[in-house]
Image: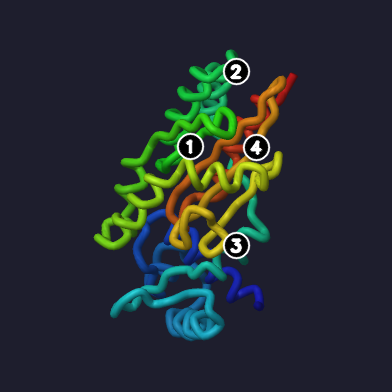
Amino acid sequence: MDKRKILILNTIIKEHIKTGIPVGSEVLVGKYKLDISSATVRNEMAELEELGYIAQPYTSSGRIPTEKAYNFYLENLSKKKLKPTEIENFSKLLKEKDELSFKQVAKELAKVSDSAVFWAFHQNNLYYTGISNLLSQPEFCQTELIYDISKIIDRVDEIINNIFNEIQEKPQIFVGSTNPFGDFCGTILVKYKLKNNVGLFGILGPMRMDYEKNLALVEFINNKIIEK
């Protein structure tokens, strides 16, 4: 893709991550002050749609990114800097690296990421929190998706058990069809070793989760856990 298409696609993705609603050409030109005419933006969006990077979810002028778009976006992902308050809060919570502390970290992580968080202290001991954050996302208000999410929640322990040995000791991002939790979700997972124990934690959200922010959170927490 040329630079103009990349700019438009990345802007659509960032706006959709923020709002959860389809993005129209007028939003790109007006809100983001792109130095491109509305007509040109519409033409580029039509080409991006033909290439499979954006789609029209229903009859509207707006478009949403596809799984292909998110995978393209993730190839050049930059991490956000955490706020000083976030660094301070997580650092305090991780002074004691025990199960109780990790549960508190999971709760804070769910709040900051506005997503669900699960934590396997080892392969058969699972804690999760923030399910209400997941269900409050606009794309999960559809009846059929609420049912799909409910099925995932019922099977979280089974899913984690199945993938536990495959997860790496560095953060991994799973989007759509690669996501063990469902093709409508995004997940960031990481496995860690602490003394003689191996654990795993991660964030589960919609496909449009804020990957820049959430990856920075997961990396910071993981580094705090494994630091000597």
Tag 2 or tag 4, which sits nearer the N-term?
2
| Residue corresponding to mark 1 | 118
| Residue corresponding to mark 4 | 191
CA gap, disc 1 and disc 2: 16 Å
CA gap, disc 4 and disc 2: 15 Å
Callouts 1 and 2 close, C-beta under 8 Å: no
Q: Which mark is residue 208?
A: none
Q: Which mark is residue 97?
A: 2
Would you place residue 81 above or below residue 108 in this image? below
Q: Residues within 10 Å of mark 3 (few under 14, many from 20)?
A: some
Callouts 4 and 1 close, C-beta under 8 Å: no
CA gap, disc 4 and disc 1: 12 Å
Q: Residues within 10 Å of mark 2 (few under 14, many from 20)?
A: few
Residue 214: image location, x then y, percent: 54, 43
Q: Residues within 10 Å of mark 4 (few under 14, many from 20)?
A: many
Which residue is pictured at 61% across the width and 42% down the height?
164
Q: Amino acid at mark 3?
A: Tyr
Nearest to the eye among marks 2 and 3: give it: 2
CA gap, disc 1 and disc 3: 25 Å
Left or right, 118 with respect to 225, comes to left
| Residue corresponding to mark 3 | 73
Quadrant containing the C terminus is: top right
Q: Amino acid at mark 4?
A: Lys
Which residue is pictured at 44% across the width and 49% down the height?
205
Tag 3 or tag 4, which sits nearer the N-term?
3
Tag 3 or tag 1, which sits nearer the N-term?
3
Residue closer to the observer: 7 or 179: 179
Residue closer to the observer: 27 or 20: 20
Residue 117: image location, x then y, percent: 46, 38
